[in-house]
Amino acid sequence: MAVENQPAPVTVTATRTVAPATNRCTLATFDLPYITFYYNQKLLLYRTPAAAAAFPDAVARMTAALADALRVFYPLAGRIRQVADGALAVEGHEGAEVVEAEAEGVSVVDLAEGDCAEEAERVMQHLVPYTGVMNLEGLRRPLLAVQFTKLKDGLAVGCAFNHAVLDGTSTWHFMSSWAELCRSASGAPSVLPIHDRSLARSVRVRLDLPASAEAHEKTDPNGPKKVLVARVFSFPEATVGRIKAVANAALPPGAKPFSTFQSLGAHIWRAISRARGLGPSDITAFAVFADCRSRLNPPLPAAYFGNLIQAVFTGVPAGMLLGGPPELAAGLLQKAIDEHDAAAVNRRLEEYEAAPKLFHYSDAGPNCVAVGSSPRFKVYDVDFGFGRPERVRSGGNNKFDGMVYLYPGRGGDGGIDMELALQPEAMQKLEEDGNFLQQAAA
């Protein structure tokens, strides 16, 4: 969320490429819908020793480990190619881009504690590479870019991953493996990735790609993107438990209980719909990017490297959502998630293969709440040798109106952090919503 006409607080000091050997893999149907999304950005903030040599030593060690990691997670070192039949594949060994930068006027605490500060948001956008870069740029750019930024009292590790190549599960598998290699001299991570994408789908799909991100955005029938603001709301473990208990309180004996995600998702969906001031007949949708590894028949292990997610939608008039009890919303989410079984997954794949589409964010609808990431991802276990991160955040990419990213609470006590992008007026109303804020402290 950059502020115009202000000097950038970060100065880039070096850029280079880190590459392994040549390999190839064809993108599966699961991967292709994300070609017109943007690079998936993650930011990890660490405290490091204040010695002058600490930053270059840390960068040298992490860069060497990155080269080892890319030998194992080799798709991230290639480029996307469109082969003769129009299918997309990843091949080559051009490598990942590594950037070094300095922001010595910025401290870790400024960023880790400043979730709602406009200045902190502005600075964080300079700590993550490839803001505004669409995944189709992977035909010309690296599929992974890493920025190491020296802070006043620590190190910021900003990563940009081409989302057409991997999902959240694979992202954090890579990050944890990279950190593991940085801490040890084994040369290989303890859990190896599975690169055979034919295990998920072997159908080859022809895509007619636009010339550029700008060319694609011009085809959006709903016009330019809206101005958004981002905030983080933290739900302590006790609050999460209370929300879940309220959602389950009215269930009859023997009914399937609502999960933590379904209960919290219902709470978030209702609160955002109130903040948007939706009318009773306005349809509001909830979408969750569900991991399909365990839904396939046969299921695939978590180590499958690629995209195995699909957006699971449910919709309802706002009057029904807000006029009904919390268990109504939670029940809608539970039903949609439970019904997305192997047959439903295959139907979605077949529909896409029959009529491939280049998506826009606005395809989700004007009143959508969409949830990505997961509090199950062990993002705070990514230790490069100087301890757990002080904070994990997303960058500015892929934050459309109503986009939610869920992370485990930074305290490691079972809480959940919610990172949300909304239009300014709706965000202000949400922050003033007593029912929402009595359970979530910003």
Image (cartoon, helix red, strand yellow):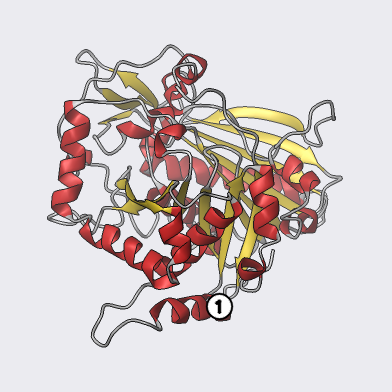
* In-image side of 226 versus 293 (left or right): right
* In-image side of 111 versus 378 (left or right): right
Q: Position of residue 390 (x, y in %)?
A: 67, 62
Q: Residues within 10 Å of mark 1 (few under 14, many from 20)?
A: some
Q: Position of residue 406 (x, y in %)?
A: 51, 58
Q: Quadrant of residue 100?
A: top right
Q: Residue at x 61, y 43 (%)?
A: 158
In the rendered image, the quadrant that contains the C terminus is: bottom right
Secondary structure of residue under mark 1: helix
In the rendered image, the quadrant that contains the N terminus is: top right
Q: Residue at x 25, y 16 (%)?
A: 83
The mark tally for this picture is 1
Q: Point out the residue furthest to the bottom here.
A: 253
Q: Quadrant of residue 259?
A: bottom left
| Pick the front one: 4 or 277 | 277
In this figure, which residue is indicated by the disc labeled 1?
237
Report if residue 101 is visible in the image.
yes
Q: Position of residue 10 (x, y in %)?
A: 78, 36
| Pick the front one: 84 or 355 | 355
